[in-house]
Image (spheres, grey):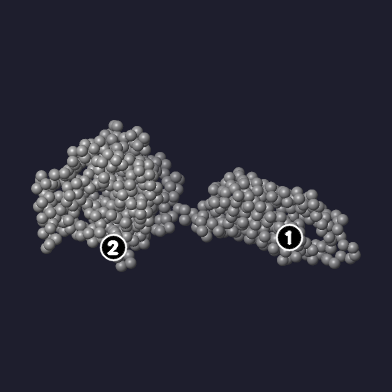
Amino acid sequence: MMHEHYDGWIVLLSVLISVGASFLGLNIASRVYRASGLQKLLWLFGGSTIMGLGIWSMHFIGMLAFHSAQALAYDPALTLLSAVISCIGAFVAFYLATHSRTGMPGMWIGGVSMALAVLMMHFIGMAAMRMDAQMTFDPLLTGISVLIAFAASFTALMLFRKFRYSIRFSYWKVNSALLMGAGVSGMHYTGMAAAQFTPHQGPADLTDSGYITFLLILISAAATVILMVTMGALFYERHLLEKMAYHDSLTALPNRNGMMRYTDSSLDRHWRGAVLFIDLDRFKSVNDLYGHDIGDMLLQVIADRFREAAGQQALVYRLGGDEFVALVPQANRERAGQLADRFISTIHKPVLVEGYKLMVSGSIGISMAPEHGQERNVLLRAADTAMYHVKKTGKDRYSFFDDQMAQEQARRLRLERDLQLALHRSELRIVYQPKWDARYDRLAGMEALLRWEHPELGSISPGEFIPIAEENGVILTITAWMLNEVCLQNAAWQKAGLAAVPVSVNISSHVLDSFLMVSMIDRALQDSGLPASALELEIKESVAMSNLEQSIEQLGRLQSRGVRISMDDFGTGYSSLGRIGDIPFHTLKIDRSFIQQSSLFFKQAIIRNMVAIAGNLNLGIIAEGVETKEQAEFLMTTGCYQMQGFYFGVPMAADSMDEWLHGGGAAGRLAAAGVAAAGLEAAAAMRQA
């Protein structure tokens, strides 16, 4: 047997290196959860390289602490192989531990991978030793070293789960690194204790071949790699990722996170200045007409102009879409107004993009600190309210937040709060407006309309509360409830023999975009037993065209079930007529704005063309907002016989609709007014001409 001993200081150094490398490796690997694609792979590679080389360095620094009477050398190939295996094992372990779908089985497999990598690295490193002695292993101590490796790997990865979403300092990271480092060190020195060296008989074949120098070179190289990877990761995170996190990738302006960082550090009770909330007018029409790529290029040009107009006077941020915010420190109302004028002027300038000459305008709301508040959210909400006031009163200008807007804002905040409970408190109700077939003088369908009776504020207009419901997400719950109620009511009418017509429900863009619409409708039809053909969905033209592929997919599934689809407000959007045939519509609904001005010749020409388009596409056509016999008479001359409006029936509750149906509805109304015969004769004459 040979006599061996260890240098205590070098042993301590090896343990510290093992713990430090474990901490760095685990810390870098935790960035994986905030990354995707190539970034995720880079973080995994960096963390596993540091962990693997750190464990490997610990092993061979421990070997430097080992002293024996024999000359010692190392096989270079096996030594390098042990380093590669250590890194590969760490990569597999981190990958499984950070993969969202692996769960606990993945953690167990990751622990096995890490433990096997540590063990293989150790024993291959031992096999790389070249000395004039025979090496054997004590089975008991070897088994203990294996158990230590598995226990440390499993426990460290389980602790890793505690901080896997955090990139900040955490005691969980420290504990995990201490456990992993201590486990690797314990496994190494237990494994070394298990090794027994018996000198060969006869003269030694080896001389001191400078193995210390060899190991120092390899360990220095590993330390250099660890240092470079760590510094590279820090640089990447501090500079590139910070820029990605706080700047908008499209316009290079600071984003919402950048604004929040600035306001968190600078916006306090001493801050004085202005907040400008900027929204582009008609930007959606640019996307609809020319596509989102052209819209993105327009935003880039506008952002550059904002940056130039603001200069050193203001900080400009892009919140998302076509919304921007400018913070103007130390500004009074005059300076804020002057800057708003510059922004509006620069928006007015035509933008040439891919051969298209684009023109948009802007609406700007301004809040002042401390006049309108000193907290970020208060000032932003005030500026946003002022901006929407501009939108409602003509657009293309700026306005300061004032007392009247404050009252509107307070009302809106109250409606937002109360709308969350309106359904639970039974404050929402459904009314039904008939659709009439003027050719056959009979009911053609109904439209279900939502009403809100506030216990204190009275009747709230749908135009006021529907946008609020869309913004806070409660529109999904309301739509599901409404679909269920409408289907149950229509099923009751059909069972009673009062009506055998489809009832239509308006579908919001938020419902269509949520991917929940199909399941909502399936459940409502199933619970009510209503045939799918007795339900009709009304979808605005702009909503259907804004996400065309998704609209086609979802509406196509509903059409295959038999549900009817109607395009609401036809003629008011900016869609390409060539794409209407791509969406499975059954009916086009002429917007009331055309009917209200149907006495004008050019409006009449537009309506006739709409009816012709529907006929050429084999689609039904209906006009809403019919309030006079003259409007009904004109529509019949165009070939549009289905109508909806106060002339035929006002929106009414279900029990009132029962009475209306029992009374014959609007039957005979056209004949009594002398409209039907004249209309049919005129229409026939026009078709013959």
Of the pair 12 and 422, the residue shown nearer to us: 422
Observer-side mark, 1 or 2, equals 2
Residue 365: horizontal and vertical position, in percent? 30, 47
Question: Toward the viewer: 568 or 470?
Answer: 568
Q: Quadrant of the C terminus?
A: bottom left
Q: Residues within 10 Å of mark 2 (few under 14, many from 20)?
A: few
Left or right of 461 on screen, residue 475: right
Residue 404 locus on image (x, y percent): 26, 39
> Is residue 623 left or right of 450 when viewed as pictured?
left
For image coordinates 17% across by 49% down, the residue present is 440
Is 321 rendered above or below residue 267?
below
- Secondary element at tag 1: helix
Q: Tell me if I can see residue 518 in this picture.
A: yes
Residue type beneath disc 1: Ile
Q: Relative to residue 494, is residue 353 depicted above or below?
A: below
Tag on residue 648? none
Q: Residue at x 72, y 48 (%)?
A: 148
Q: Locate the N terminus and report the quarter of the image it occupies.
A: bottom right
Cα distance, mark 1 to mark 2?
A: 70 Å
On screen, residue 20 versus residue 679, left or right, reads right
Which of the marked residues, 1 or 2, is nearer the chain's N terminus? 1
Q: Which mark is residue 124?
A: 1
Which x, y percent locates residue 642? 20, 50
Name the residue: 74% across, 53% down: 188
Label 1–label 2 contact, CB within 8 A: no
Rendered image quadrant of residue 296: bottom left
Asked if residue 346 can be seen in this view, the reply is no
Q: Secondary structure at mark 2?
A: helix
Report the label total.
2
Q: What's the amino acid at mark 2?
A: Gly
* Residue bearing the label numbered 2: 578
Tell me the residue at 24%/55% (across/down). 620
